[in-house]
């Protein structure tokens, strides 16, 4: 499947933004600068790549990272951008994942480590359109008596499922809820009867189209302590003017006892390259945060899981993220 092609000298002297299509072969070359399309009607990820293919992708990604280091050895990231990107590294372990939600866009890897009957009592789904298979899957997983709350002020109804309740409400940062139909996370807990829920007893999925940064940056440890796991889609990672806000949002999660256990790029958007390709991260990134996850050595290189799938099955395969060390 993978046919690595060498990086031409002329291409090495050019910035990724100046490069056209790397090769017409479905190869994994400099591909990691341009992206690579899958072979055949179904994408590699939709077809569930073998572990050997995943390992080949990861190893090729690492080799290219090493080759590009020389391009940027005399340059540096701004301290705040470095802090932000480094905070996205996987630093926590999860031994058992389950994919909940859609087979492509709208599906999230959920860590099942330590799940025992009754431990998770409720789930919050922020951003649902009029369908939300994640709510359906959580309802089936948690069983009778569990509360599944859906939130979206842009649609008239949510996903019907046992235990599910739809709220025509959008999310807002703490202290910024003057608009009608906007709740902060603390108001969500209060208005759904979950303010007194045991700590680490709620799972939340949040896809709120760039509002997530201010919501998390202003959140309190008391509110975040209610959550066992938070599945987030982060947007607009290329907006360097807001990297301070982004760093604050992620650090708020880390300070509340969460660790990143998985990252995955949404290939409806492309890749953000920094320092001529030395570092790269998807422009839209799905992140699984787990409270009190077992710590591991932080990983600068993204690792694909066999349950990962392309958000856009007809789109380009994204290169593996390569993040700076702290």
Image (cartoon, rainbow, N blue to C red):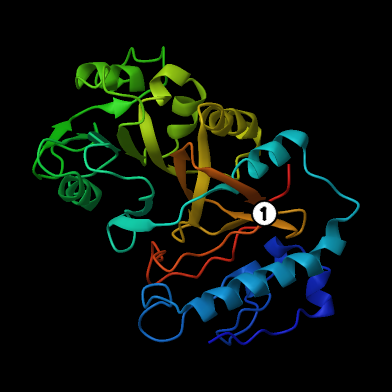
- 253 lies left or right of 180: right
Residue drawn 27% across the image and 21% down it: 189
| Quarter of the image where one finds residue 192 | top left
Q: Position of residue 28 (x, y in %)?
A: 61, 79
- 47 lies left or right of 272: left
Q: Position of residue 303 (x, y in %)?
A: 56, 62
Q: Position of residue 11 (x, y in %)?
A: 78, 74
- Can see residue 199? yes
Depth check: give the residue in front, 146 or 67.
146
Looking at the picture, does residue 256 appear above or below residue 73? above
- 206 lies left or right of 301: left
- Residue marked by disc 1: 300
Image quarter in which the C terminus is found: top right
Residue drawn 20% across the image and 49% down it: 141
Residue drawn 50% across the image and 70% down it: 317
- Can see residue 20? no
Residue drawn 84% across the image and 56% down it: 72
Q: Position of residue 214 (x, y in %)?
A: 48, 26
Looking at the picture, does residue 298 appear above or below residue 193? below
Q: Element type at marker 1?
A: loop
Depth check: give the residue in front, 86 or 269.
86
Looking at the picture, does residue 67 appear above or below residue 105? below
- For label 1, the crowd category at 10 Å Cα-Cα, with few meaning under 14, some 14 to 19 and many 20 or more, is many
């Amino acid at each position: 499947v993978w046919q690595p092609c060498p990086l031409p000298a002329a291409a090495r002297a050019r910035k990724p933004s100046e490069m056209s299509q790397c090769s017409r072969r479905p190869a994994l070359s400099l591909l990691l600068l341009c992206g690579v399309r899958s072979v055949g009607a179904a994408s590699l990820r939709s077809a569930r790549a073998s572990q050997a293919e995943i390992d080949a992708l990861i190893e090729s990604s690492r080799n290219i990272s090493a080759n590009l280091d020389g391009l940027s050895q005399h340059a540096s990231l701004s301290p705040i951008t470095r802090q932000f990107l480094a905070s996205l590294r996987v630093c926590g372990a999860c031994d058992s994942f389950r994919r909940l939600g859609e087979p492509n866009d709208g599906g999230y890897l959920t860590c099942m480590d330590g799940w025992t009957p009754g431990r998770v009592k409720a789930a919050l789904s922020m951003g649902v359109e009029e369908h939300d298979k994640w709510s359906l899957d959580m309802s089936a997983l948690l069983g009778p008596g569990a509360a599944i709350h859906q939130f979206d002020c842009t649609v008239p109804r949510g996903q019907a499922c046992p235990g599910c309740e739809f709220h025509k409400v959008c999310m807002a940062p703490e202290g910024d809820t003057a608009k009608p139909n906007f709740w902060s996370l603390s108001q969500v807990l209060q208005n759904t009867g979950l303010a007194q829920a045991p700590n680490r007893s709620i799972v939340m999925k949040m896809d709120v189209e760039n509002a997530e940064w201010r919501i998390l940056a202003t959140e309190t440890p008391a509110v975040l302590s209610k959550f066992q796991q938070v599945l987030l889609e982060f947007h607009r990672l290329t907006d360097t003017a807001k990297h301070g806000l982004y760093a604050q949002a992620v650090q708020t999660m880390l300070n509340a006892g969460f660790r990143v256990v998985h990252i995955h790029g949404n290939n409806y958007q492309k890749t953000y390259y920094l320092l001529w390709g030395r570092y790269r991260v998807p422009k839209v990134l799905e992140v699984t945060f787990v409270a009190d996850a077992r710590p591991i050595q932080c990983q600068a290189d993204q690792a694909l899981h066999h349950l990962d799938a392309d958000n856009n099955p007809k789109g380009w395969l994204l290169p593996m993220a390569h993040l700076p060390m702290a």
